[in-house]
Amino acid sequence: MAQTFRRVVTGHDTDGRAVIVSDEAATHILQRPSRPGVTLTNFWISDGTPAEYDGAEETCTGDFVLHPPQNGSVFRCVEFGPEDPEVMAKIDGKTAFAEMGAAHNVVEGARHPYMHRTDSVDYAVVLKGEIDMLMDETEVHLKAGDIVVQRGTNHAWANRGTESCIIAFILVDGVTQRDADPQDAKGIPKR
């Protein structure tokens, strides 16, 4: 059973005093058969920079998409259950990512069916458990308390253990470099 997260959102009353706007379980959740054992839970989506703190009191509405909005950010947790190698051998990663509006983000022919990249800088904190982050040719084993700064690179998450792993992510829309020509601002950097 997937982790349930309590989400508390603050705001201001008509006199400008700090108040609790909502205090309930987060409900913008994505679970799907094409990515067995994985649950994504969104907590907040900002659709621009600078982010508004006096705008909408609920931003997690509509379709669940992988990447942050243009010039925006997404705050979410992902729970990765242990992978079954037999199931993984039959997985179509493109279908799984298509369900999040991101079929084009999958790296075809990669060493893991969920290898993907986004045009974003992602801040990740492993909250619970252990997981392997696979890159094109290398990998790193991560444990609770480890931090990752994912900078628009190909990657996949593989839970080869026996316990679930939960990672908190903040995805920020990004470019290769702010001064790059528009045709070079997205995608894999040209060196």
Image (cartoon, rainbow, N blue to C red):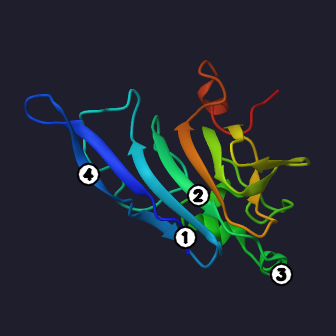
Q: Where does the image place residue 73, in percent across and percent down from the top left?
A: 47, 40
Q: Is residue 190 positioned above or below 47 on the image?
A: above
Q: Disc 3 designates what residue?
A: 86
Residue occupying the point 63% across, 24% down: 181
Q: Which of marks 1 and 2 is nearer the N terminus?
A: 1
Q: Which of marks 4 and 1 is nearer the N terminus?
A: 1
* Depth order, front residue of 41/47: 41
At mark 1, the secondary structure is loop
Label 2 with label 4: CB-CB less than 8 Å: no
Q: Report which quarter residue 132 is drawn in.
A: bottom right
Q: Which of marks 2 and 4 is nearer the N terminus?
A: 4
At mark 2, the secondary structure is strand
Q: Report which quarter residue 94 is drawn in.
A: bottom right
State the separation of the CA atoms marked 3 and 2: 22 Å
Q: Disc 2 designates what residue?
A: 78
Inspect the image, locate mark 3, and give the three-letter code of the amino acid beneath it: Glu
Inspect the image, locate mark 1, and give the three-letter code of the amino acid beneath it: Ala
State the separation of the CA atoms marked 4 and 3: 42 Å
For residue 4, say whether it is visible. Answer: yes
For residue 151, say whether it is visible. Answer: no
Q: Disc 4 designates what residue?
A: 22
Q: Is residue 27 positioned above or below 128 on the image?
A: below
Q: Earlier in the sequence, mark 3 or mark 2?
A: 2
Q: Disc 1 designates what residue?
A: 2
Q: Which of marks 3 and 1 is nearer the N terminus?
A: 1
Inspect the image, locate mark 2, and give the three-letter code of the amino acid beneath it: Val
At mark 4, the secondary structure is strand
Discs 2/4, front: 4
Q: Earlier in the sequence, mark 4 or mark 3?
A: 4
Discs 3/2, front: 2
Inspect the image, locate mark 4, and give the three-letter code of the amino acid beneath it: Ser
